[in-house]
Amino acid sequence: MLTILQILGALGVFLFGMKVMSEGVQKFAGARMRAALASITGNRFKGALTGLVTTGLVQSSSATTVLVVSFVNAGLLTLIESIGVIMGANLGTTVTAWIIAVVGKFSVAKIAIPIIGVGFPLFFVGKGKVKSFGEFVVGFGLLFYGLGLLKDAVPDLKAGIAKGEDQGAIDTIRMCIEWLKGYGYFSYVLFMIGGIILTLLVQSSSAAMAITITCAMNGWFDPDSDYESFRISAAVVLGENIGTTVTAWLASLGAGSEAKRAARAHFLFNVIGTVWMLVVFLGFTALVWEVAKLLPDSLKDEKVNKNFGKNEVAFATAIFHTTFNLINVGVLIWFVPQIARIVQKWVPEKAEVGRDRKRLRYISQNLVDLGELNIAEAEDAVRKMSNHTNDMFKGFKGVFDNPAADLSSEVSRLKKMEEEADLMMQDITEYLVKCVARDMNASNASNIAAMIRIVAELEEATDCIYRLVKLTEKKYNKSYKFTDHQVEQIGQITSVVGQALGAVDNYLLRRTPPEVITSVKSLEEQSHDMRKSFNKEAVKRMSEGDIRVEMLYTDVNNQLMALANHALGVMEASDMASVE
């Protein structure tokens, strides 16, 4: 029991180090990583390189693929682009195996503790990027330290057999392994299934890889043959390649069709690779074992003649994992369009209607902590809400400018749009609150605060627009008639408000030129002056004309002025949250 707790504790330190390192990288370079993903523009090779680098930095292919699914769902990546990134992520995750193999040849504490020592003052004393870099360094040191603890915690069966220690426990483990090994070639398939289960349990292919290689190095798979130990570990690694796709698959549940297709493409890519590797498994592993023997002594145990096989298993597994993924990517990257067509047939397009189409889905919150990278989904949702607001305003103008037409269906549509805007504000605000609850840098925290204000202003703007629609509907239902002069004045203030909303839509979450902000402020002031002037005229006319018509007229002017005020509020907050 103590041994199991030690293994779990070591695994916990490893995973915690990975988490801290990943969060540090995202704070330090999150904006660049998002920009790199957003600039792929259909180039599958650039996408693969981006996926490789991103996964190498965050040390989690699951995080990268969930991020990809998230970006596809938000419309920031196409299916073709996402498949390229996913392929690169599979190659990037091979770095973990090499780290584990290298760790096996020296005392990890000798480097892990000094690494933490370097990062500690940067993390606690530094600010901004320096603090984030310190967090990354501390996480990197903890990751190494966890690997060292795992290496020490996992019992060495080969040495145990030689010394006659814990014979009962060793015999139990050997019986289980021997039972799985008793089916010839099919045994490798069983171990592959075991790799799938292991990855599902620990929810991290990197952690599963650490467990697998450590167990192989300590003779758990075959204490009598290092070569067979390597082959079994290679089979388990194949299973881990499939198991890691489950995270993205789960992340796509409840997402749009394109996001589901990206997750299925990840699964299909890894399954295709596993199938062809099972066909050539025996020959391929034999070749890799021979290559591992050619590695220089500097990469092997210091006591080469005595303990050579132990580290050879680790390096052979790393070589197998890297070579397999490299070949798989090198071959299948030419068939990305065909893979895309397969998953498009697998997941047919389903029309999303009404409010469901507008909902912001939390597809990356509970499965993988993407920290800074979550913000991209919220940014896209805010832009959609701005477009939604402008569409509503155009709908109001259409209703107002066509008094003779029966536009009851259009009024109903605009009512639904107003309800959708309420849901969008609720979704985005909840999402942003969850994002800000994560530990992120001050700049992103400020951006989130600004975006919360933006969606609140946009929701108020849609309320104003719907009130304008209802006032227009009342005018038609009551047969109130505006004079040509009144219609002209409403047209003037409507034009000013439309310009302000258009500027907001064009520059939302972008670095806004000062002259544009000044222009929107001027438009807001114009609407205020127009409303004041026009309403004064209406008050003078009340003694002579229909008070009800004049009251309706002033209500329209008031709502239009309020709408311009909300547009200015969005513009000011947007400049604070600019992402370019």
Image: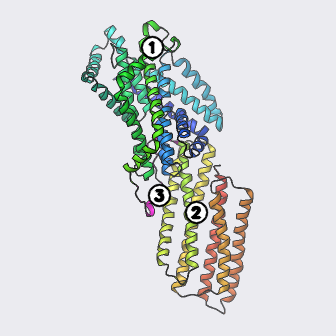
* Residue that mark 3 sits on: 359
Residue 513 located within the stretch drawn in magenta: no
Q: Does dot 3 land on a helix, a strand or a loop?
A: loop
Measure how far apart labels 3 and 2 are at the Cα level: 16 Å
Residue stretch in magenta: 349-370
Q: Residues within 10 Å of mark 3 (few under 14, many from 20)?
A: some
**Which x, y percent locates residue 207?**
43, 30
* Residue that mark 2 sits on: 458
Q: What label sits on residue 293 in the rendered view?
A: 1
- Please determine whether, in this image, residue 94 is positioned above or below residue 64: above
100 or 284: nearer the viewer: 284
- Please determine whether, in this image, residue 98 is positioned above or below residue 453: above
Question: What amino acid is found at the position of numbered circle 2 in the picture?
Answer: Leu
Residue positioned 59% across, 51% down in the render: 448
Q: In the figure, is residue 365 to the left or right of 575?
A: left
Question: What amino acid is found at the position of numbered circle 3 in the picture?
Answer: Arg
Measure how far apart labels 1 and 3 are at the Cα level: 56 Å
